[in-house]
Image (cartoon, helix red, strand yellow):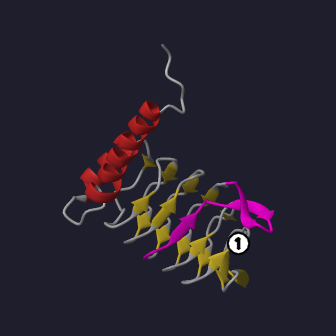
Amino acid sequence: MAVSPASPEVRAQHSVYRRAWHLRVNVIAASYLVRPEMRVRIYRRSGMQIETHKIQPGCFFFGHDVAIGADTWVNHRCYFDTRARIEIGSSCDLGEEVMLSTSAHRPGTSERRAGAFDPQPIAVGDGVWIGARATLLPGVTVGDGCVVAAGAVVAGDCEANGLYAGVPARRVKELD
């Protein structure tokens, strides 16, 4: 007898897998007691494409659909909402508590404004610096060599080699 994908057995099995994954990635690997080399090994074995050993403790990954390039620094307590793909280039720097949020909804009816779930990917180019507590919203692309100021909310694409600041983030300066 075949088990349907929506059966309680399949849902329970998936729930156990997700809990084990979160324990491994967001508790054990995120611990201050784990060496950077071991942290990266756990991330890679959990399905992430990680090319740097510079991911600090306390980061949270919702899922495995993330790629982080070589020599990129990810500071403490960054949040990766990986309901859609997140790609970060090489030689980037992410400040403390940067949030990369791929979760989005289409507008709903007046009874419930958050409509159908519509996650969108985030792409960050090479050599980018994202300041502390900046937020990147679903579907944005940050071009190579950009600086995103601390606390900025990036709601649209950022062209290469610019300083972006504010809520919403706007290009305030050209960088060479």
Q: Which residue is at a point 44% across and 69% down the rendered structure image?
A: 78
Q: Which residue is at a point 39% across and 55% down the rendered structure image?
A: 52
Left or right: 29 with respect to 157? left
Relative vertical location of residue 169 with respect to residue 79 in this rendering, above or below:
below
- Residue 48: x percent and y percent? 44, 46
- Residue 153: x percent and y percent? 63, 78
Magenta segment range?
Answer: 96-118
Relative vertical location of residue 173 with respect to residue 129 in this rendering, above or below:
below
Mark 1 packing: few (<14 Cα in 10 Å), some, or many (20+)? Answer: some
- Residue 151: x percent and y percent? 56, 84
Whether the magenta-drawn stretch holds residue 2 is answered as: no
Whether the magenta-drawn stretch holds residue 111 is answered as: yes
- Residue 140: x percent and y percent? 68, 63
Instruction: Determine if residue 122 is in view.
Output: yes
Helix, strand or loop at disc 1? loop
Q: Which residue is at a point 53% across and 54% down the rendered structure image?
A: 82
Residue named by callout 1: 155
**Magenta residues, dominant SS class:** strand
